[in-house]
Image: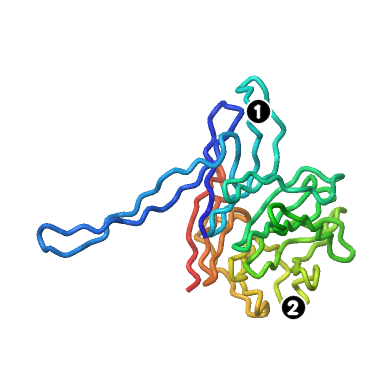
Amino acid sequence: MRRSVTLRWSGATATLALVLSLVAGSMAATPATGTTTSQPATYVVDFVATAGSGIDMNDVGDVIGTSRLDTGCGSTCLPPEDTVVWRGGQRIMLPNPTPTLTPIFLSDINNQGWISGSVGVPGTTTHAVVWKPSGTTYTAIDLGSLPGKTISTAVGIDDLNRVVGWSTTQNFPPSGAPFLWTEAGGMIDLTTLGSPLEEPLGISPGGTVATHGTWFDLDDPTNVHILAPPPSGLLVEASGVAINDAGDQARFLVTNAGQALDYPFRYHHE
């Protein structure tokens, strides 16, 4: 899956939403041998919006993020920030299913154009949400929360429109559980299917789920794989996780002393 990239202007009030498109490497003959080799691929910049921030992009190029509508007043005003999808050259605003809860946070878009996210201030009565394509617009579905819980957040959605996330209580200490949501079955506690009692951190297009210390497939949540321990002096960060269908993952390690520096790393499933 291609991902969107956000370029921020230092000291400016606006951001640029852009994507990098891979250009296939050209074929060239090697003078010494006459054999044909592929030159390194390059990237070109495709600006999506002059005042926006990209979150994610699917394989057909639909981009989700936030955007301020260009009213033509330049730097003298700051229009409201909208939560949007850029699809087929159109800027589509996403509706809020629960207007009493703001703001909107997006987390993922799948290859069918379904979008996962949440509404509400984190740590309060936040609700997980799915936006379902409906013609040229979207229908918002408030996913609610698990029984006995008051908060839910959606981490991601796979290509079968299965949403994973975390639902918990607002009191301290909180009592939470991972959830799986489908349009047909609603929200259920993932641990009842055999998954670990850990917060999902990412999901692949085929339904492979990453948690803080494990990963598993939604088609068989009981087959849980334990992540190898990190090197000495480093901890696995519980954010910024991406995973593919095979279980390969992009994660961050953080030093557990000093300045707590982050280091990106690739975790191979084998």
Q: Quadrant of residue 11?
A: top right
Kindly identify the residue that appears in the image at 60 percent across and 55 percent down.
237
Asked if residue 48 is positioned above or below residue 139 in the image, the reply reads above
The disc label shown at residue 19, or none:
none
Mark 2 vs mark 1, foreground winner is 1
Kindly identify the residue that appears in the image at 50 percent across and 46 percent down.
19
Front-lying residue, 18 or 203: 18
Marks 2/1: CA–CA distance: 50 Å
Kindly identify the residue that appears in the image at 68 percent across and 27 percent down.
78
The secondary element bearing badge 2 is classed as helix
Front-lying residue, 215 or 228: 215
Which residue is most to the front? Answer: 135
Q: Which residue is mark 2?
A: 193
Which residue is most to the top? Answer: 76
Kind of residue indicated by mark 2: Leu
Q: Looking at the picture, how far across and down is residue 87, in whole percent? A: 60, 50
